[in-house]
Amino acid sequence: MSEPSGGKTKPTSVKILVAGGFGTGKTSLVSSVSEIDPLRTEEMLSEAGEGIDDISGVEGKRTTTVALDFGRITIAPDLVLYLFGTPGQSRFWYMWNDLAVGTWGAVVLIDTRRFETSWAAIDFFERRQIPFIVAVNRFPDSDYYPAEELRAALQLGEEVPIIDDCSALEPESCKDVLITLQEHIMRTHLERAGYDENAIANAIGE
């Protein structure tokens, strides 16, 4: 972080992606936690997507993100997160590469009723070695699974944090998810830079 004239610290801006399958709550999370009016590019589901879009399990959903969602949240006086929600439908996945440019990390939202819809997002970030966490978005009719069962089902390494119960409709819950991600990003970058565990713990306040 730089020190501009006057002695005030200029906030660090961090780009974050919010990813996952169709209907997992990406737009809701960005909208819930954003301190500005979020940008949404939702369109009504149309006949053009019939036979292509998989809406099994979320048949009542009538809209889909066709480009991105965008919001901003100040986590600390010196840290601002810019949130980019990715489109969930497979026919829009080509945009993920562009959205991933410059990102520091990602939240992958999971709907436990439809685990398979978020596998592509997990694979995307693993292949590009982009730090990510997994957060289970709580739906009224979804089953609860403890973190270790989720880790086994999703074949995730121990280094990937899992939040096994959150709500994309509750701002404080979303903020907790983002704080967990930010700590994971810091840890990952320090580990890759060769810092030992004591130095990492001191840096992230453990």
Image (cartoon, rainbow, N blue to C red):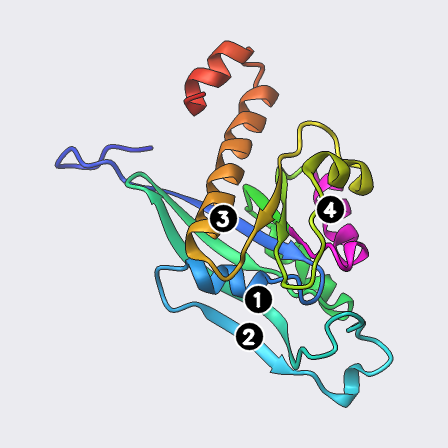
SS of the residue under disc 2: strand
Residue bearing mark 2: 41
Please tell me which residue lies in front, 171 or 104: 171
Residue 43 against residue 11 in the figure, above or below: below
Residue 173 against residue 195 in the figure, above or below: below
Dot 4, how many residues are within 10 Å of its Cα: few (below 14), some (14-19), or many (20+)? many
User: Could you tell me if the residues under marks 1 and 3 are in contact, i.e. CB atoms within 8 Å?
Assistant: no
Which tag, 4 or 1, sits closer to the chain's start? 1
Q: Amino acid at mark 2?
A: Thr
Please tell me which residue lies in front, 160 or 186: 160
Dot 1, how many residues are within 10 Å of its Cα: few (below 14), some (14-19), or many (20+)? many
- In the picture provided, is 179 more to the left or to the right than 184? left
Which tag, 2 or 1, sits closer to the chain's start? 2
Confirm whether the magenta stretch covers residue 150: no
Instruction: Calculate the distance from the C-alpha at mark 4 to the C-alpha at mark 1.
Output: 18 Å
Instruction: Calculate the distance from the C-alpha at mark 1 to the C-alpha at mark 3.
Output: 13 Å
Residue 68's disc number: 1
**Horizontal and vertical percent for residue 8?**
19, 36
**Horizontal and vertical percent for residue 168?**
53, 58
Residue bearing mark 4: 122
SS of the residue under disc 3: strand
- In the picture provided, is 9 more to the left or to the right than 158? left
Residue 154's disc number: none
Which tag, 1 or 3, sits closer to the chain's start? 3
User: Could you tell me if the residues under marks 4 and 2 are in contact, i.e. CB atoms within 8 Å?
Assistant: no
Residue 146 against residue 171 in the figure, above or below: above
Highlighted magenta segment, given as a residue range: 109-128
Please tell me which residue lies in front, 111 or 90: 111
Q: Amino acid at mark 1?
A: Leu
Residue bearing mark 3: 15
Q: Amino acid at mark 4?
A: Ile
